[in-house]
Image (tube, grey):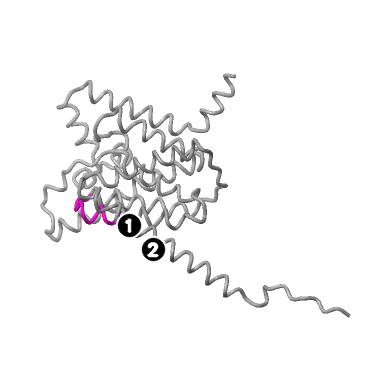
Amino acid sequence: MIYGILSRLGRIRFTIGYVGVLLTVSSALIVLGPQARDIIIQRASTNLHNLAHGHLGTLLGSALVVDAGPLYFWLPFLTCMLVLAELHLRTIRLVVAFVVGHIGATLLVAAALAAAVELRWLPLSVTRASDVGMSYGALAVLGAMTAVIPRRWRMAWIGWWVAAGIASAIVGGDFTDAGHTVAVILGVLVSSRFRQPIYWTPLRRMMLVASTGFGFLLLAHHWATMAAAPVFGVLGAVLAYKLDQMVTARRAVLVPAADVPQPVASG
């Protein structure tokens, strides 16, 4: 019995470890108080000031410090998402998707901010803005779940997240919103390297619904973006689905004649 439990827990070892660290760090921030919390968040932030001064450890450390509302709300949903992804994608692929999304989105956003500050499109104060949390990595994991979405609905899934993300980035107008969109796209791109058998149970479908809802709140966390993202998401999903159908139908028509079995002439 104990071996069976440990075997099941071993399948979600990244989720258990990461959620345990988040719980510990978040609880410590509450105990230490607002002043210490602000100092820790500033030092862990992957802002331009820290990166420019060689604090590259923030690229990983920032994913361990979360400043995103009540712990009791976001931690269960994040756990649900990571468990689902780890069961489907396996541990190594989950880690790859999370790290690529978190670090990749952080560096791309930092490069864009550096260019904007250099061109004086943004004030210098943005270089010290706090930027911590698990949202980039979580959204990349959700994007990587593309690999296990049934083939028929896969393009609609991609169209929804990409269109909703772009709408959120434009309407939100914040560099974090842009980072969320980049993270989702990176996750989708990473998923193209994954080849996994698709195995959905009723429980896992329910977990997917909860995970997508949580992902949507990460992506569209303002009232304006919550209104715009679903509209553009649906349009993107419908457009991607129709285009995929057209491409599939065209490929079926353009099958080379040589590939079509020819009847054997009788003697």
Q: Is residue 8 left or right of residue 129?
A: right
Above or below, comparing residue 39 to residue 211 in the picture: above
Do the residues under discs 2 and 1 have CB atoms within 8 angstroms?
yes
In this view, the mark in front (2 or 1): 2
Residue type (three-letter) at the residue carrying disc 1: Ala
How many numbered discs, if any? 2
Q: Which residues are magenta?
A: 165-175
Q: State the residue lying farthest toward the right.
A: 267
Quickly name the residue at label 1. Answer: 163
Tell me which numbered mark, 2 or 1, is placed earlier along the sequence.
1
Q: Which mark is residue 251?
A: none
In percent of width and height, residue 88 lies at: 51, 41
- Name the residue located 17 percent from the left edge and 58 percent from the top edge: 116
Identify which residue is drawn at 31% across, 50% down: 105
Place of residue 220 in the rendered image (x, y in percent of width and height, measured from the top left): 26, 47
The residues bearing labels 2 and 1 have C-alpha atoms spaced at a distance of 10 Å
Circle 1 residues within 10 Å: few <14, some 14–19, many ≥20? many
Q: Quadrant of the N terminus?
A: top right
Q: Secondary structure at mark 2?
A: helix
Quadrant in which the C terminus appears? bottom right
Q: Which residue is mark 2?
A: 239
